[in-house]
Image (cartoon, coloured by chain):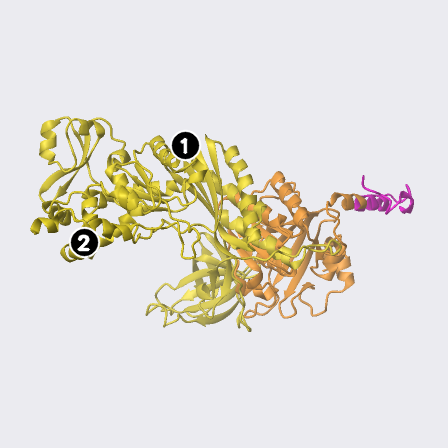
Chain colours: A orange, B yellow
Amino acid sequence: MISLSDSPPASLPGHALDRPAVLAALRARIARLDRSGARPEGDSLPLCDAIDQRLPGGGLARAAVHEVLAADPGAAAGFCGLLLARARGTVLWIAAEPDAWPPGLARFGLSPADLVLVQAPRRQDALWAMEESLRCPGIAGALLAADGLDLTTARRLQLAAEAGGAIGLLLRPDGEAEAGATAALTRWRVGALAGTGGAHDLGDPRWSLELLRGRGVRPQRWDVVWRPAAERLDLDDAGSEVEPETEVEAMPVQARRRAR
Amino acid sequence: MRRRACGPPRLGQDSLLPATPEPDAGPAGEPAISRRIAALHLPWLPVERLCLTGFAAIWTTEGSRRALVAVSPAAAAAGLHPGQALADAQAILPELALHPHVPEADAAWLRRLAHWARCITPLPALDPPDGLLLDITGIAHLHGGEEALRRALVARFARAGVTVQAAIAGTADCAAGLARAGVGIVVPPGEAAIAVAPLPLQALRLPPASIAALHRLGLRRVGDLLRQPRGPLAKRFGLALLATLDAATGLRPRPLRPLRPPPDFLAARDFLEPVVTREAIDATLVVLLPELCRQLQEAGQGARRFLLHAFRVDGVVQLAVIGTGLPARDPRHIARLFREKLEGLEPGFGFERLALEARACAPLTAAQAALPGEGGASADTRRQSLAELLDRLTQRVEVWRLAPRASHWPERAIFRVGPFESVLPPPGWPGSGPRPVRLLRRPVRLSAVALLPDAPPSLLRLGRASWRVLRAEGPERIAPEWWRDRPGRPFRDYYRVQLVTGARLWVCRSGIAVPGEETQWWLHGRFE
């Protein structure tokens, strides 16, 4: 039996008065129970400060599967490359036709020494390869580029990731899994935003990161910009030179849109 | 005088004496292990390969003459024999079924049988065109003595549908001569000379010209030949004849050339009842793998190739091979790799023996286990589990790493290496210029609208879709490598463009833009 003594009911803030707080505490406890392996706190990949504050655990959790819907294939590949690079270790890129290109991914800090490509033309082979990889404690991350994953498959992958400890990324085309349920911990939609430079200067890449669903988080959307020189992801401030401050990211997206 | 020179000489017995080998007495006086060879002769090899029954014969052309090479037992009983003219044979048996002679196929079948004979000894050798030589040194006791082994060999081949004549002796040529003559005996060590003496000269495969000449001299048996003084024999018939005689009597035995070197590590199981089911094969592997891995561990070795030989009752050897990237000896890991490969085995009427071999061995030290309090896997364990994962993946899908190369040409900037090779990006890599995160394996042909022939595109079209270009950076001209490319390959002008949707693409114009001609535009990659 799992002991609940670490947070006794008496410590819950306000018994019946503060329902949201009670619910949040209960949810946190369930989340702790739900994760099979007790991972130490902070075992997650940081994105950028503003987003990390919103995510439980301070970033994208390892030992879990995250879905990335590619509204723009390039931006989604960049986002995945960034996550894999920050996983720090050997990562696998599994696809029917793996087209990851190390010279470009190196800008995210992903060394070709860490990248292994797996070509699995058949779907079942690709899923098998992903599951085997996620179960392996020797890798830091694995990416599967596939479409049409059902709930059972995703659940299997999630369990495999919990067993192995690596981060799993499912790179899927956008539009197919709009309403579908998922067993992944979070689901993101990554799109590209037009840059802010001049006509002959593309500037730094800008993405729209949309957290569509996630366990214990509220769906939200951020516009971010990737600074290759500093290898840092920043909140985008719509072209002004001011660094994003807390009041910008603290506002809900709708409110920020209205404010513009 | 003349008769005395050719008649049975009294000196013969004296010259025979030193020919008798004494293999049991080594130089230090202790008994040395003498080789024991079983020779198998397959008199019906071409016929049995084709499973011919009834009146059938195999023929070939020798010059302008068409003659039989082999005949089926029924046809032989009717009076046909190899070497007979085809026309004669057809006159005797009009209903004779004729098949062309394919020596290559016969040789391949003999080789297959030799592989199958490895279920008896690890060292079989070929004795073309119709014989096998098995080194049975030290294995006779497993079958209850040499005579029992000889009978078991005959019975085993008979079960596979192959008639063999078997003989066992201390030298290969002696045993082979006996087998060819149809004398199925076991020659005790040291009595090879006595055993071959009554054989006809043909049994030793002497050249036909020599045999004819010896027959003219009245020498019809090997014993006649042995009694002759060696000097005149060598002078008249060459040293090859003496070499053959010495090999047969064991004075100077010829070495066997085994089909393949014996494995360093081997674990095998024989079955009384042939196994057919996958479960039985799996259960056998569960026994064999720990046995083999224990051998490897005791020797401090790991192997990179594991071969499972499955000997089928009908004389076929099937093979399941796995390879690992690093030397391995973990039974669990190897069993997982074999799981996929065992699908390919076809038991048919069943396997009578499964043998697991380890090859490509290399020293492998025992891995240090992580301390219990350390938490998490140690670096060694992680590396080990990664290697095992890559092994498993390579069994089923294609796995590679990409290594950088000093080339500006995008397709050549990286090249594939094996998953176990270490990739070391050189300092300063990937150099100047932003590069896409995805490179299309096949560039997509675009049509573009540009303000000027050599200006960046302002509109891109792919099929019916069209995108307006918001920004464009470039061009970056990449010239072909003249030392490698065919001459006249056009250079490329690469642009980084951003569409109104925000997508960033790597497009290129191939060659010089000539006014009035359509320029070729390609989509080659996607930026983040």
The quadrant the C terminus of chain B occupies is bottom right
Q: Are marks 1 and 2 on the same chain?
A: yes
Rendering coords of residue B152 (x, y %): 38, 34
Residue B229, disc:
2
The residue at 10%/47% (across/down) is: B217
- In magenta, the rendered stretch is A1-28
Q: Which element type, helix, strand or loop, lies under badge 2?
A: loop
**Amino acid identity at mark 2:** Pro
Rendering coords of residue B442 (x, y %): 43, 56
Q: Is residue B425 left or right of residue A214?
A: left
Q: In this rendering, does residue B107 appear at all?
A: no
Tell which circle, 1 or 2, labels the residue nearer the N-terminal end: 2
Camera-side residue of B449 and B492 = B492
Camera-side residue of B314 and B146 = B146
User: What count of labels does the image hold?
Assistant: 2
Q: Is residue B273 left or right of residue A131?
A: left
Q: Mark 1 points at which residue?
A: B348
Q: In this view, does B1 lie above or below B142?
A: below
